[in-house]
Image (cartoon, grey):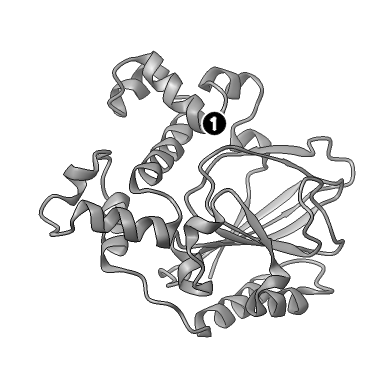
Amino acid sequence: MKAKIFRFSNPHPVIKEFWEIRADDHDKMLTHFVPPMGCPEIVFYIGARSQIKNTVVADGFIKGQYNTLQSIKFHPGYHLFGIVLQPYGLKQLFNIPANKLLNAVIDVKEHPLTASLAERLNGVAAISPAIVQQVSTILQAYPLQPVSHSTLTFLELIRNTSENKIGSILKNTGIELRTLQRKFKAEVGLTPKEFIRIVRMKRLEADISSGKNLLQIVADFDFADQSHLIKEFKDLRSFTPGELINKKLLLSDQFPVPDYFNL
C-alpha cells in the first residue's frame, strides 16, 4: 500500500489537504477502522468503480462529519483520491445543512461540482501535484457560501488552545453560546462539544502513537484518572487505548507513512 498527502504552503479557503491511497492486490488488510476526523471529505474512486463493499456509491462520495468510528470494507487493489475540506466545507461548497449529512455519505454524482470532477478524473492512473493543483483551482473558483463569524472564530480558537470547556474558550469573544451552538451545528454538522472531543482525541491518539505513557497523557489532557481517559477514548474509538495498540488499529498502524507534497 502507498499513500500520498498534498498540503498547501499557505492556508486554502476551502481545502485542508488532499490524499491518495493505493493498495496492492496482495494487501490483506481490507477492513479499516477510521475514527471521527472533524472534517468532511470528497472521495473519488480511481480506476475501478464500487471499491468499497459497505456503500452503494459507484464513483465516489461526499462524506459528512462522523461522530463515531467507521468500519470500512474495501475490495482488493482499491485506489482512492480524497479531498479533506475545512470543517464547514459542506455548507461552504454545497450549501448543505451539515447536520443533515451526519454519519452519512451521498454519491458524487448528486452534485454538479463533484460530478464534473469525477468525469475529469476518469482515466487518471495516479494523482500528481499537477492534477491536485487543477482540482484546487476548480474548487477555489466555485462560488462559496458564507460561513458565520461565530463558527470561524471558534475554530480558530480551538486550533490555538488545549482548553476543552466551551465557556472558557468563548470568554471575551462576545459570542453567545446559543448562537454558536445553532450556527456551528448547521455549518459544521457537529455540536461545539462534539468537535472539541474529536480534536482532543486526535491529539491524544497522536501521543499514544508516539509511545507516550498513559499516566502522562492523563495528566497532560486533564483527565480525572486513567479510567476516565479510557471511557472517553472508547466512546469515540469503540476500543480502549490498549486494544488499539494490541490489535494495531491506530491509524499509524493501518496505513503506511505517506509521501508528502507541498502545493
Q: Is residue 146 above or below residue 84?
A: below
> Picture quarter containing residue 237?
top right
The answer to whether residue 8 is visible is: no
Q: Is residue 84 above or below residue 220?
A: below
- Under circle 1, the secondary element is helix
Where residue 121 sits: x, y (%)? Answer: 76, 74
Q: Amino acid at mark 1?
A: Arg
Compare residues 97 and 192 and report the one nearer the observer: 97
Q: Which residue is mark 1?
A: 237
- Check disc 1: other Cα within 10 Å, few if <14, some if 14-19, many if 20+: many
> Picture quarter containing residue 217?
top left
Left or right relative to 196: residue 169:
left
Q: Who's the residue at 71% across and 76% down the image? A: 115
Where residue 250 sits: x, y (%)? Answer: 59, 32
Where residue 245 sits: x, y (%)? Answer: 59, 22
The answer to whether residue 139 is visible is: yes
Left or right relative to 210: residue 243:
right
